């Protein structure tokens, strides 16, 4: 239920802001707006405010299906217009006004993202400290010299280092480096009063096509450092049968020393022999400060075509957390910068997918968005606001793409009109609209397929 509510609220807010951008600029340009609708289909709620801009009789509607919205303006192309109101029709407006009205929707979404990121910066968000778990074997992180347990204090590109505020901040920088093909310099805090050291994470070795949902496994930095501790044990599970209990600290599995929870999870997953059977291994533990040895045999589960081992218990204690909060001015500036960075990253990713340099597995549809909406809402207000900001940026950037059925497509028509002095012909307009609809349907189909694959294996 939380997922459904969070998803509907997210759609409602983002669509309402987008359409409100169109509406406000249309009114400011003197265009008559007949209807403002959030959602399609049967009207669940409709009203007409008594106090409106002079000359406006706009009807506001909330539709039954929240997957979109529209602002219906007076337009000679959609029906007859009285001669005395012709000057208020959209199609009779100068080019700059029409372009401003169309661009206002995506711009409103980008401004909303700035507001949301700023709010998060002011409120503060609890994030894991940038202490690294043991890197994935044969990964870029392992090649760079990371072994697990390092506290990353600064990071940057081309020698320009800045403080790393949290593990999520580090992940963001790694994402940028991987997509741009730039090596990331990391500064590791020294231990016991010793000076820190620098190392280089060779992200330039990654190809753009590696920027898929498994990107961080290829980099090797998957999770923050956690104690290799056993959490809640499920009744009837392999963990319970083996004698494991909540709070057990795992020291070794077989001959492998265990340093953190992520490494323990990887070792458990790999506890499958060549015949596909679970391997029984000796675990050395600490329970209540006392050493203990147990024989643990996991259960084998299939994940797609791969067999992995599970013990049926939560593995790894919660990571060390830090509250990331900004001041008033710095919070606004960081909100603007983050919106710009996410927008630029989205555009680059779309471009790379278009020319085949990045995986189309990065396209996400409504199922993934709904899943993330529920998960972020369950984590608290700030995480939900971050989710809304990210989707708002994506909606703004997507609508600025030069596809005929989107706002960017209309801006493309206006660019042609501004350069040639004449509008796109009706015949070409129809061809472009059909092509745009076909391309959009293909994108939606791929996104939905990715959703089903991602969520249901």
Image (spheres, rainbow, N blue to C red):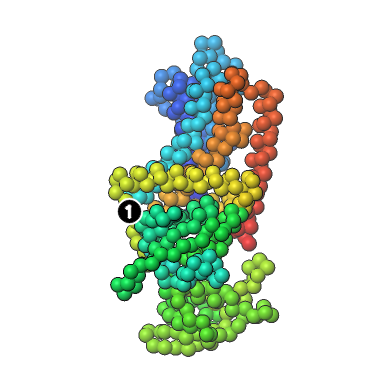
408 displayed left or right of 274? left
State the residue position of label 1.
325
Q: Badge 1: few (under 14), some or many (20 or more) residues near its Cα, within 10 Å?
A: some
Taking depth in this image into account, of 143 and 148 the one nearest to the observer is 143
Q: Residue at x 50, y 39 (%)?
A: 396
Front-most of 156 and 351? 156
Which residue is more in the foreground, 457 or 413?
413
Q: How many marks?
A: 1
Q: Is residue 242 left or right of residue 196?
A: right
- Could you say where residue 270 lies in the image, as x and y percent from the top left? 59, 76
Residue drawn at (45%, 40%), measured in percent from left and top?
A: 110
Residue found at the very far top of the displayed protein: 83
**Residue 373: percent from the left, percent from the top?**
49, 52
Q: x and y percent of residue 313 in the render?
A: 50, 75
Q: Which residue does the image show at 36% across and 57% down from the upper left?
A: 163
- If the image is split into quadrants, where does the C terminus sit? bottom right
Up the image or down, 454 lies above or below 291; here it is above
Say whether residue 410 is visible: no
Q: Secondary structure at mark 1?
A: loop
Q: Position of residue 148 (x, y in %)?
A: 45, 71
Residue 338 seen by the camera: yes
**Residue under the point 44% across and 65% down:** 199
Q: Say if 184 sits above or below 434 in the image.
A: below
């Amino acid at each position: 239920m939380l997922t459904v509510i969070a998803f509907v609220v997210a759609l409602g807010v983002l669509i309402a802001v987008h359409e409100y951008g169109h509406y406000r600029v249309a009114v400011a340009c003197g265009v008559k707006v007949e209807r403002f609708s959030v959602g399609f289909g049967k009207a669940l709620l409709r009203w007409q405010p008594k106090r409106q801009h002079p000359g406006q009789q706009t009807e506001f509607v909330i539709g039954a299906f929240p997957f979109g919205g529209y602002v219906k303006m007076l337009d000679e192309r959609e029906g007859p217009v009285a001669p005395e109101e012709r000057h208020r029709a959209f199609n009779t407006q100068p080019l700059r006004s029409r372009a401003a009205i169309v661009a206002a929707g995506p711009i409103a979404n980008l401004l909303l993202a700035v507001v949301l990121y700023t709010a998060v910066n002011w409120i503060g968000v609890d994030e894991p400290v940038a202490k690294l778990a043991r890197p994935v074997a044969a990964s870029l992180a392992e090649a760079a010299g990371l072994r697990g347990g390092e506290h990353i204090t600064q990071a940057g590109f081309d020698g320009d280092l800045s403080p790393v505020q949290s593990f999520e901040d580090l992940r963001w920088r790694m994402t940028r480096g991987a997509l741009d093909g730039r090596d990331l310099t990391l500064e590791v805090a020294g231990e016991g009063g010793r000076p820190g050291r620098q190392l280089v994470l060779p992200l330039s070795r990654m190809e753009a096509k590696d920027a898929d949902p498994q990107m961080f496994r290829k980099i090797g930095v998957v999770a923050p450092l956690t104690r290799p501790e056993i959490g809640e044990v499920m009744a009837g599970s392999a963990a319970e049968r083996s004698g494991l209990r909540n709070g057990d600290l795992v020291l070794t599995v077989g001959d492998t020393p265990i340093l953190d929870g992520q490494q323990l999870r990887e070792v458990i997953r790999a506890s499958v022999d060549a015949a596909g059977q679970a391997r029984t291994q000796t675990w050395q533990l600490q329970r209540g400060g006392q050493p203990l040895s147990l024989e643990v045999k996991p259960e084998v589960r299939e994940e797609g075509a791969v067999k992995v081992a599970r013990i049926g218990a939560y593995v790894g204690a919660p990571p060390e957390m830090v509250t990331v909060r900004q001041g008033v001015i710095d919070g606004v500036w960081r909100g603007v910068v983050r919106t710009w960075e996410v927008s630029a990253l989205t555009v680059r990713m779309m471009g790379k997918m278009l020319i085949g340099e990045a995986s189309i597995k990065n396209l996400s549809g409504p199922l993934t968005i709904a899943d993330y909406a529920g998960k972020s809402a369950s984590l608290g207000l700030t995480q939900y606001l971050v989710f809304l900001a990210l989707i708002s940026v994506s909606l703004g950037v997507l609508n600025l793409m030069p596809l005929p059925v989107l706002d960017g497509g209309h801006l493309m028509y206006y660019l042609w009109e501004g350069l040639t002095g004449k509008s796109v012909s009706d015949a070409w307009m129809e061809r472009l609209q059909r092509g745009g609809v076909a391309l959009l349907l293909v994108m939606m189909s791929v996104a939905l397929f990715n959703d089903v694959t991602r969520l249901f294996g």
